[in-house]
Amino acid sequence: MEQRQQRKLDHIRHALALADGPQTNGFEDVRLVPQALSGVDMNAIDLGCAFLGKRLRLPLLINAITGGTAQVTGINAALGRVARQAGVALAVGSQAAAIRDASLWPTYRVARQANPDGVLIANVNPNVAVADALRAIEAIEADGLQVHVNVAQELNMTEGDRDFHRWLDNIAAIVKASPVPVIVKEVGCGISAEVTARLLDAGVRYIDTGGAGGTNFVAIEQQRRQVPAVQTAQDAQTPSLLPADQAALMAWGLPTAVSLAEVLYAVRRFRREARSSTAVGQQEHLPAPGDDVHVIASGGVRGGFEVAKALVMGASLVAVAGEVLRYLLTPQGDWHESGEQAALDYLDRLQRGCATAMTMVGSGDIASLQRCPYVLTGATQAWLSQRGMN
Amino acid sequence: MEQRQQRKLDHIRHALALADGPQTNGFEDVRLVPQALSGVDMNAIDLGCAFLGKRLRLPLLINAITGGTAQVTGINAALGRVARQAGVALAVGSQAAAIRDASLWPTYRVARQANPDGVLIANVNPNVAVADALRAIEAIEADGLQVHVNVAQELNMTEGDRDFHRWLDNIAAIVKASPVPVIVKEVGCGISAEVTARLLDAGVRYIDTGGAGGTNFVAIEQQRRQVPAVQTAQDAQTPSLLPADQAALMAWGLPTAVSLAEVLYAVRRFRREARSSTAVGQQEHLPAPGDDVHVIASGGVRGGFEVAKALVMGASLVAVAGEVLRYLLTPQGDWHESGEQAALDYLDRLQRGCATAMTMVGSGDIASLQRCPYVLTGATQAWLSQRGMN
Amino acid sequence: MEQRQQRKLDHIRHALALADGPQTNGFEDVRLVPQALSGVDMNAIDLGCAFLGKRLRLPLLINAITGGTAQVTGINAALGRVARQAGVALAVGSQAAAIRDASLWPTYRVARQANPDGVLIANVNPNVAVADALRAIEAIEADGLQVHVNVAQELNMTEGDRDFHRWLDNIAAIVKASPVPVIVKEVGCGISAEVTARLLDAGVRYIDTGGAGGTNFVAIEQQRRQVPAVQTAQDAQTPSLLPADQAALMAWGLPTAVSLAEVLYAVRRFRREARSSTAVGQQEHLPAPGDDVHVIASGGVRGGFEVAKALVMGASLVAVAGEVLRYLLTPQGDWHESGEQAALDYLDRLQRGCATAMTMVGSGDIASLQRCPYVLTGATQAWLSQRGMN
Amino acid sequence: MEQRQQRKLDHIRHALALADGPQTNGFEDVRLVPQALSGVDMNAIDLGCAFLGKRLRLPLLINAITGGTAQVTGINAALGRVARQAGVALAVGSQAAAIRDASLWPTYRVARQANPDGVLIANVNPNVAVADALRAIEAIEADGLQVHVNVAQELNMTEGDRDFHRWLDNIAAIVKASPVPVIVKEVGCGISAEVTARLLDAGVRYIDTGGAGGTNFVAIEQQRRQVPAVQTAQDAQTPSLLPADQAALMAWGLPTAVSLAEVLYAVRRFRREARSSTAVGQQEHLPAPGDDVHVIASGGVRGGFEVAKALVMGASLVAVAGEVLRYLLTPQGDWHESGEQAALDYLDRLQRGCATAMTMVGSGDIASLQRCPYVLTGATQAWLSQRGMN
Ligand SMILES: Cc1cc2nc3c(=O)[nH]c(=O)nc-3n(C[C@H](O)[C@H](O)[C@H](O)COP(=O)(O)O)c2cc1C
Ligand SMILES: Cc1cc2nc3c(=O)[nH]c(=O)nc-3n(C[C@H](O)[C@H](O)[C@H](O)COP(=O)(O)O)c2cc1C
Ligand SMILES: Cc1cc2nc3c(=O)[nH]c(=O)nc-3n(C[C@H](O)[C@H](O)[C@H](O)COP(=O)(O)O)c2cc1C
Ligand SMILES: Cc1cc2nc3c(=O)[nH]c(=O)nc-3n(C[C@H](O)[C@H](O)[C@H](O)COP(=O)(O)O)c2cc1C
């Protein structure tokens, strides 16, 4: 098996085996304000929303997980069926493998076959050539294209990238060429306000926080190095980091709630600037209106209360990856008979949790939820206050 | 036994069995300022006050607990005698059962018989028809009417309500029709500033915080579902919430001290607005003057220091439910010989605790207590500061 | 033995047996700023200061402990010798016993005999008749008179006072009549800013914080009630407080550092007002100039770093009671051969600790120490910030 | 063996044996802001910088450790070789021994012999005569001269200094006479803003924080007193401090991150004043331009993330002492075969850790790193905010 293909299976296996942390997703610091009169009929709550030109029944995305090797084709097909039945969006895993080896496209395409009318999103890394990005979209008739940025993960892979200086320019080029919207996402370390500003300037209009508190790729890669399935000569040579640095790296990243607040802060600034420059008539080279920016909250989301909190803070959508896998597969990462139903039940309970929270804060739909008061506490509040973003 | 009647007994049994929490009532964050000179004669301390047109010896209400089934009639009679002897107010439990089945009125009426001249309060849910609310008042010659709002509890009962959109209008209608003042109360999740504003606009002039930190109905209903006395078909079908959401629900609610501060904040705003609109002469459709608003602090109150703290913060009255039960009944919820005396002793020690605190902050009566300085700390201070209410 | 006399021995025994707390003295929140260049010759450090018209070698007072029964006469004599040799001030314990029974004056007078030229301070309660206060002074040729206020202690003694309404007036009368300065002191619950303002208005110019964190009389009296040496009929009748209130009472009181900051805050305000009223020429009914106010920091002081911190904050003197006893007597409260030397050694090490701290913050004398920067942190900082006193 | 020589070995042995603490270096409170796009080619990261007129490959100094006795000559030679190979600066230990006994100069000179072209720094105490300081420089052809201030350590040595009143003047005299720049350094208790201001006024332009969190000389000296290698008559006589004071002393000192912020705060003020006084033309008696001030962060630094944090905060260089020893020697302080290689590997991993952090915050060189945003949290933030330095 090729190293890259083995990695896919390793990631799944280790993601399932690892406990979360050391950081939390920060949503415990985001407090909703109980509204004792409610005013809502819970059974009438509408969580439907538009996303990438289609309707979702839930403001939810099953985030990029897999593809690129025969063993995971079944997973992508299953995720496609789950997404269709639950009415949520789905992203396939990194399509880099198929870009290298065209025989692997079907391992992604099954997701589209299982869900012909749903929202399906392609996924590439930020080193990919523009033409290859377009092929990734085409291959699954994607409604959008995710570009994942994952510096910490790369630095923790023996075989990972070390040179990131072309990423932003390449993303800008992809945005220009892409027939569908481009979503830039982290994979567990979060997007900061500064990065958001640069992405917006580069024309990106969809940002997925991919914050810390859930799947931790630093931990996963460390596990992989300790129990490597394919031993490489490089492994032995890699001088490991000092214990203090290793610990710092494990805890690296903006918790999802912090990242979400940072991204939204930068988006609000961007919108203000967009409006004020419109005001003075410089219509021409204007970016697309700021109101078209969409923020996806992800990283360690597990329950419906967290979904509600993310929406209250201003997210348009919430994404989950690791937690869906835990319902779909066995703890060892193997296929299991009723996994698909379990994943569907999971999404159903997630919806119920979100609706419960909405009822208790008196919001019958997403728009009303986004006007709800909330309170920031603890480390999240302290961080944002020090950053001047509260 | 009817489901609703069995529920009464279940509630009592589980309320006694459950430990408090996970939240505290927040009064540990409210710090009194020792006044070493005192200036008070503790034996001359007067805790008497007016409530609903009558005199109380203590600013205390034994809050709504029970009624509606033969087995609890003795409890209501005992509470009536205790309230009379201690000179405190008493609310009966929800009278919905008797509204459905008129044979049950006597299970509430015993409280009035035991305490003909005391302050007795009727209790209904916010779905009740106006006419039924009036019957509930009449049935016990009530001095006031409690309407309990309990969204979290309902959502945790398989048989509970899911539709809350009519509550506020119905409360407004009851207020208009009621010959006695209407008290809106939560049952353990607290009233926020926003809800207070709406209630005041709807004409409500008595608000009982019913905050978190004491009896936790989410926990109680969960216990009931795990050990259901009456197994229903519904039980099995109910898709339970995700673990993360279940935990969020258990810790839902504003701690009593927080809720008290929120309610008082909204009341002060309301009073200011009432005054300023009077100033410009719009006398006619004015709500009753803001100074007639009364705030009752309840939820997890156990001792006299907490009573003193609630009064210092601005409450007019304090209410206890669960703690009285713990003295009146055995830990298993059974009748016990000297329970009535134990409950009386409890109230006596509560008074003594309050008087001790008053002596140490140099206040001889409630009016003086309400001018005492106090300090907010910890999570309560942080919350209120984030809410802009400090 | 009379109840009051037995109490003296009980207090000593229990004070020695009890661990500190539950509160700390708060000095852990007061942080000195290391000054790496020092600039000080530690061996030349001068801790001498004036107090009550005499010179002390250390800014230290051995606070009121005992007297009034034959068994403790030896303690007062020993303390007198220790104070003389160490060059510190000494206060005798409450002289109420001798006021009632003139045969007991010698149990206090031994302290003066042992230390004819030192600073010796009389001690009475605030109920004492003016004439009796004068006798207490005379009896030991006192340089000053302490009036102790101890509401929490009284309320915890079955035989204690309950009526405190005359205290302030009586203190004012004593101040007027006394030929020596009057010191008002708490005994472990601290003096607040409000109390300070009243005492200053009543003409008091010496205030001893007596804050929480050391000897805890609520705990002592509780121990005494549990293991009463003299069983009284009252004991059985006393309805004890509720557990929640008992816990609140145990933790009652301003920690010493907090109380010190509160007292100094009120003193600074008083000085400003004194000055500004002088400015507009209302010379006549002016209180003695504010600069003559002296603040003594006490309550749980154990080491020399705490002494330094109190002086940095603005105290003129520091007092210790419980800790001196621990060196003078055996843990059981019995006499012990080398106790006097141990107490002297203790004071020597206290001085050394203070001088060490002074060297490290670069202060060679008390005046320079009082200009040192310091940092408030933790609960002490939070309290003072909420009180608007930082 | 002379007492001073034995002390050298004791210090090494105890430094290796002691765990860090009780304070941390504070860098856990300094949070970098992840920049998900990076923009950096990690392999091209340049950590080179100028220091004392020469080039370093890393902004790192192996801080003053030893010399002055034959047994440690090998250590100085080894450190010299390590410094040369790694391209970092090196300071020898205190040269006081050689100043007293000229036969000991070679124990320091080996470091220069091992590293003829590198940055080597002499080290003296602040009591040393100016002429002796110059001899110390000459003896190793030093590029700079460290003067260590270590009040807490001296006070904890039975044989230590007690008189520090001449230090500042002597440092000023040394600065005037020295042909090379003078670095004033603490050895584990940190430099405050006030001390920084005085040093800048005295003409010092290099300050090394030497903060708390790493090697703790109070703890080391205490260990030495408990297990003294050379028993002296003085040992028995030394009256030890009270337990409370001993604990305060153990935790004395500004954590490195706090000290770094304090020093930099004072440096910024100094620069502002320097500029504004230039503006009005008082060119003559001006101190060297403020921009020539260099701040070295040291005390408990272990990993590369800490190096990066120190640089982000504004340090020019970072120094390590204790941690290098742990790689160079056995845990018992003995020579070990591969120690030199281990120390080199350590520096390599430190560089890698720093480069990893730089990549993840998107900085390719030190200048860019120093413009990175960072967030202060916890006790460090609270301290600086109370000091008005945030
Ligand atoms: C097994 C596994 C494989 C993943 N593969 C990809 C991938 O190929 N591309 C990508 O953008 N993200 C990938 N992710 C990251 C997720 O999309 C998501 O950003 C991250 O797991 C954080 O979300 P979570 O905490 O909900 O898992 C993967 C995650 C897991 C658990
Ligand atoms: C056994 C039990 C039954 C209760 N029944 C009612 C009720 O019927 N109506 C109502 O308004 N509140 C009811 N409550 C709620 C109490 O009135 C009160 O709001 C709540 O228990 C919080 O106060 P506590 O912490 O002092 O118990 C009940 C409480 C208990 C413990
Ligand atoms: C055994 C004992 C007896 C005391 N008796 C008196 C007293 O008679 N009068 C008084 O003003 N304070 C008395 N005190 C209180 C002390 O003067 C002091 O205010 C208190 O103990 C707090 O200081 P500390 O923590 O250093 O002990 C007594 C303290 C102790 C330990
Ligand atoms: C064994 C040992 C000996 C030391 N000797 C000296 C010395 O002679 N002169 C000096 O200025 N600092 C000396 N130091 C202090 C270090 O230079 C440094 O300031 C201190 O150890 C804090 O840094 P660290 O936490 O990285 O060890 C010594 C440190 C150690 C561990």
Image (tube, coloured by chain):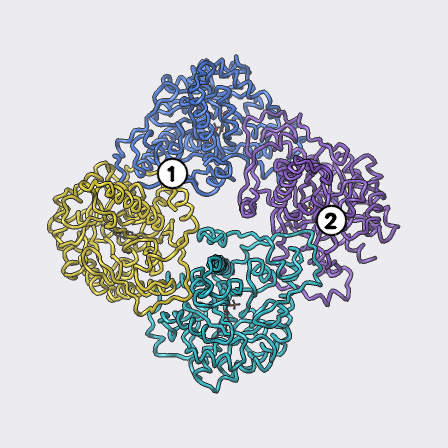
Chain colours: A blue, B yellow, C cyan, D purple
Amino acid carrying label 1: it is Tyr
Callout 2 crowding tier (Cα within 10 Å): few <14, some 14–19, many ≥20: many
Q: Residue C284's x, y, as percent?
A: 45, 65
Q: Residue furthest right?
A: D103
Q: Quadrant of the C terminus of chain A?
A: top left
Which residue is under mark 2?
Answer: D148
Label 1 resides on the chain identified as A
Q: Is residue A143 left or right of residue B135?
A: right
Q: Is residue C236 left or right of residue C295?
A: left
Q: Residue C92's x, y, as percent?
A: 52, 76
Q: Where is residue B48, by image quadrant? A: bottom left
Which residue is under mark 1?
Answer: A374
Q: Is mark 2 within 8 Å of ligand 4?
A: yes
Label 2 resides on the chain identified as D
The nearer-to-camera label among 2 and 1 is 2
Alpha carbon of mark 2 to alpha carbon of mark 1: how far? Answer: 52 Å
Under circle 2, the secondary element is strand
Amino acid carrying label 2: it is His
Q: Residue D286's x, y, as percent?
A: 71, 39
Q: Quadrant of the N terminus of chain A?
A: top right
